[in-house]
Image (cartoon, grey):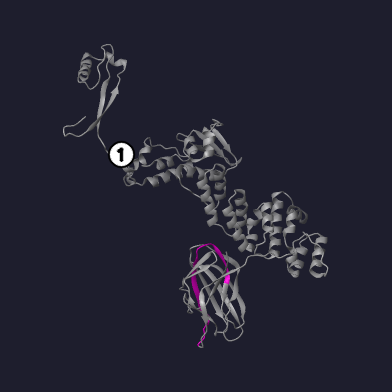
Amino acid sequence: MVDAKGRNMKCLTFLLMLPESVKSKSASSKSSKKAVNSGGACGGGSSSKLPPVCYEIITLKSKKKKKMAADIFPSAKKQGGGSSTSTVQQYQQQNLNNNNTIQNCNWQGLYSTIRERNSVMFNNELMADVHFLVGPAGGTQRLPGHRYVLAVGSSVFHAMFYGELAENKDEIRIPDVEPSAFLAMLKYIYCDEIDLSADTVLATLYAAKKYIVPHLARACVNFLETSLSAKNACVLLSQSCLFEEPELTQRCWEVIDAQAELALRSEGFTDIDSQTLESILQRETLNAKEEVVFEAALSWAEAECQRQDLTASIDNKRKVLGKAVFLIRIPTMALDDFANGAAQSGVLTLNETNDIFLWYTAAKKPDLQFASQPRKGLSPQRCHRFQSCAYRSNQWRYRGRCDSIQFAVDKRVFIAGFGLYGSSCGSAEYSAKIELKRQGVLLGQNLSKYFSDGSSNTFPVWFEYPVQIEPDTFYTASVVLDGNELSYFGQEGMTEVQCGKATFQFQCSSDSTNGTGVQGGQIPELIFYA
């Protein structure tokens, strides 16, 4: 139809069929309705039945642009002047704590997007058509769910509720998933939000794997990779093998190899399973002294006795270790370390102890079940930041002042120590205090001495344990030297150095009070594992 101004219009007519009870109304009412019928807006009818009546006519302009819900209800104009996001978060928190049921009868109008409205239903009894009894006996929590939402978020839930073998159960028991982890998974499915913590991430990863929620599982793995350290590397190694995450497994091995002694002495090492124990003990690139490996194996055996409800006797420790004890390379220990440690532990039999002593001392060595070749360990790499070095007659004076430089690297590495210059006028001994900091926080330090032979070579000074360096973060390397002041120093420094697969960047440090900078000075090398 066309209006008075010639514009195209669309007429939507809603017809309401009157019920039979209306027949009893007055004649005046009937006549008014006949008048409407005669107007031609609606078709006529017989006198025995009242005709359909035009209930309402709504005209809409043609070719009008459609608006989405977010356009109609922009977030800046929410009811009450508040942000819908904060309101949704309040609902989510209430739901986590109280299993909240929405009281507002028009709550849908408060939120502009389907995501926000869906978020409100998270852990909410409103319209819930299934419940989960989550957790082991004694720690079970009853959680509501909505079949459609769950099926959209997980192929396992889809098969459970809508597949060929679907069971129409009102309650589903899930004893092998922690309630906190199940809630974290539901929050991702309902709210498209990932909420992880160090305490729940492994359990959440298990839930995400079980119900095939791949994006949440990937987020859990990323969280674990970024929080990976020597303290948790052995436990995460065990879990990464269980969950079949090869990238995480590789990252765990990098940490264990480089920081082996820290990893073996961590509490997490005693929590691993026997298969993971054997894989660590037979690791060729393990960067640890063998006596540390032996002590770690004994600590694990004691914890395993407790897990098996056995007394932690010497016999039981040897029993739970089983064949793993032969993976410890005892003959590679120094004789003093063996005599004062493993030989007196009681874990070795008398014949084994006697044979090892003979292997150390006798010309004809007995056959041993223990591997006698030392581990290869890791080969340290060196990042050299100067193109040349020199010395001058006016000397490089130390006098207790600090030489310092800042650096960053594009991948995770482990700084094991520094390469330092020595005397330029004959052999000399130096005392060096080395430090490594990040944003003023001390990560590693050591006080040691090294001997310089008078050449322009660099001489390594090591930290007690290698320090893990995260990518794309600046760290400060510092040294305070005490010794012969006539020494070599670096020249033609580079701001960027490529070392294998790692790229180092250097910049001047405000901690440097003795002249060292990017272009020249001390700390010519960073010694690292990658």
Which one is nearer the viewer's eye here, 220 or 136?
220
In the image, what residue occupies the spot 71% across and 55% down?
Answer: 301
Q: Percent x, y for residue 100?
A: 45, 39
402 within the magenta span = yes
9 within the magenta span = no
Q: From the viewer's perspective, is residue 356 above or below residue 105?
A: below
The residue that label 1 is drawn on is: 66
Q: From the viewer's perspective, is residue 234 above or below residue 414?
A: above
Quadrant of the image for the N terminus?
A: top left
Q: Percent x, y for residue 68?
A: 33, 41
Q: Residue furthest left?
A: 4
Element carrying mark 1: loop
Q: Is residue 47 left or right of residue 218?
A: left
Instruction: Please state the extent of the stretch shown in magenta in the rendering.
Output: 394-417
In the image, what residue occupies the spot 23% across and 14% down?
Answer: 26
Q: Is residue 195 left or right of residue 483?
A: left
Instruction: Look at the image and tell me whether residue 312 can be seen.
Output: no
